[in-house]
């Protein structure tokens, strides 16, 4: 297995990132357990999809919080599922609030907390965990509406499990919850001091372009919202960190670096390995 931390232990503090640990899958547990900092001052961004059951999310974040100087978490769709058999049967907003509460008990930063400021090399930057969901606006090219796009996905047999396990209560649908989250998040970002650059952390990509390489384009509708497409330009953004797609890579849009930092499912990482390492170094940036 590759080294979990870029560089050597004495090479200075780092802002690192990972997502899509999916420790509900047995083969991913040793990967999570292997994640360690290179120095006592390293921070770790966790951009969602730690696990499905609340106890597994807590177990993983507790371990990481015990090792890293600071852990910053943004929820993914899997944490928001209400899977059968989970003793925590909360749904929708109540489930999210439960996860925020357990993070706070662990000292993990959530989208509901003040943005911590990284003062290491490449800083100061504020690390802003976001929670925006999706609203089906990344729909298929031939679909004129959410309904048509979903019909095409069902016809193709490409339907996200969110449709069955992610419950948006008290909102009527996931897209309603998404619009509420986008409005609240946008207001917080607008109130942020523009002289301090931001690292925007979201489980879902903020722009549609990363989804262009999906094997199944129908899946893009569960991958974000057009409402966030200009955030990296409107706000003073040093970098964007996201996951969800299970396509780890670095891309640039409008001169801003986007880092997809997912581990993914065993069938994926067994095929491609971990060519970028398990933890992505966000700062200091090394081209």
Image (cartoon, helix red, strand yellow):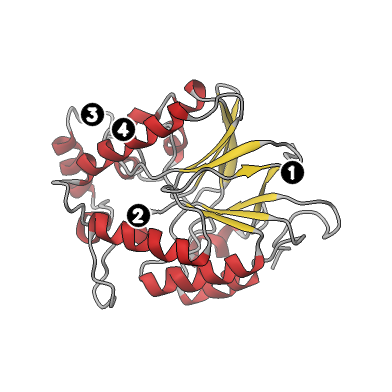
| Rendered location of residue 53, percent (x, y) | 36, 71
Q: Please tell me which residue is depicted at 62% across the width and 42% down the height of the picture.
A: 117
Left or right of 198 on screen, residue 246: left
Res. 142 mark = 3
Between tags 4 and 2, which lies in front?
4
Residue 68: percent from the left, percent from the top? Answer: 65, 62
Mark 2, residue position: 77
Crowding near the residue tagged with mark 1, few <14, some 14–19, many ≥20 C-alpha atoms within 10 Å: some
Q: How many marks?
A: 4
What residue appears at the point 28 percent right and 53 percent down from the top-left corner?
160
Question: In front here: 14 or 249?
Answer: 14
The nearer-to-camera label among 3 and 2 is: 2
- Tell whether 85 sits left or right of 214: left
- Residue 129's spot in the image, x, y percent? 48, 45
Tell me the quarter of the image containing the C terminus: top right
Relative to the observer, which residue lies in front, 29 or 185? Answer: 185
Q: Upstream in the sequence, badge 4 or badge 2?
A: 2
Task: Evaluate whether residue 98 shows in this view.
Answer: yes
Quarter containing the N terminus: bottom right
Q: Position of residue 221 (x, y in %)?
A: 29, 40
First-in-chain label (4 vs 3): 3
Tell whether label 2 touches label 3 (CB within 8 Å): no
The residue that label 4 is drawn on is 183
Q: Marks 3/2: CA distance?
A: 26 Å
Q: Secondary structure at mark 3?
A: loop
Q: CA distance from mark 4 to mark 3?
A: 28 Å
Pointer 1 or 2: first along the chain: 2
Q: Are marks 1 and 3 in contact (CB under 8 Å)?
A: no
The residue tagged 1 is 120
């Amino acid at each position: 297995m590759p080294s979990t931390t870029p560089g050597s232990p004495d090479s200075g503090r780092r802002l690192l990132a990972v997502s899509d640990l999916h420790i509900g899958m047995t083969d991913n547990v040793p990967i999570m357990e292997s994640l360690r900092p290179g120095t006592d001052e390293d921070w770790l961004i966790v951009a969602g999809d730690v696990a499905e059951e609340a106890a597994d999310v807590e177990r993983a974040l507790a371990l990481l919080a015990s090792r890293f100087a600071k852990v910053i978490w943004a929820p993914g769709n899997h944490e928001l599922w209400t899977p059968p058999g989970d003793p925590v049967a909360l749904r929708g907003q109540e489930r999210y609030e439960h996860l925020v509460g357990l993070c706070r008990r662990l000292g993990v930063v959530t989208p509901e907390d003040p943005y911590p400021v990284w003062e290491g090399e490449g800083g100061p930057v504020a690390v802003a965990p976001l929670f925006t969901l999706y609203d089906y606006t990344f729909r298929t090219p031939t679909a004129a509406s959410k309904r048509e796009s979903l019909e095409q996905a069902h016809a193709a047999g490409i339907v996200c499990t969110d449709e069955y396990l992610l419950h948006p209560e008290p909102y009527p649908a996931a897209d309603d919850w998404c619009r509420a989250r986008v409005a609240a998040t946008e207001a917080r970002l607008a109130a942020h001091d523009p002289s301090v650059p931001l690292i925007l952390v979201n489980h879902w990509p903020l722009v549609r372009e990363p989804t262009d390489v999906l094997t199944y384009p129908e899946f893009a509708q569960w991958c974000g919202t057009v409402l966030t497409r200009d955030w990296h330009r409107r706000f003073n953004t040093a970098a964007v960190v996201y996951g969800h797609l299970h396509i780890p890579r670095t891309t640039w849009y409008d001169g801003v670096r986007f880092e997809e930092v997912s581990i993914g499912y065993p069938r994926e990482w067994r095929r491609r390995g971990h060519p970028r390492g398990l933890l992505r170094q966000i700062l200091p940036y090394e081209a």
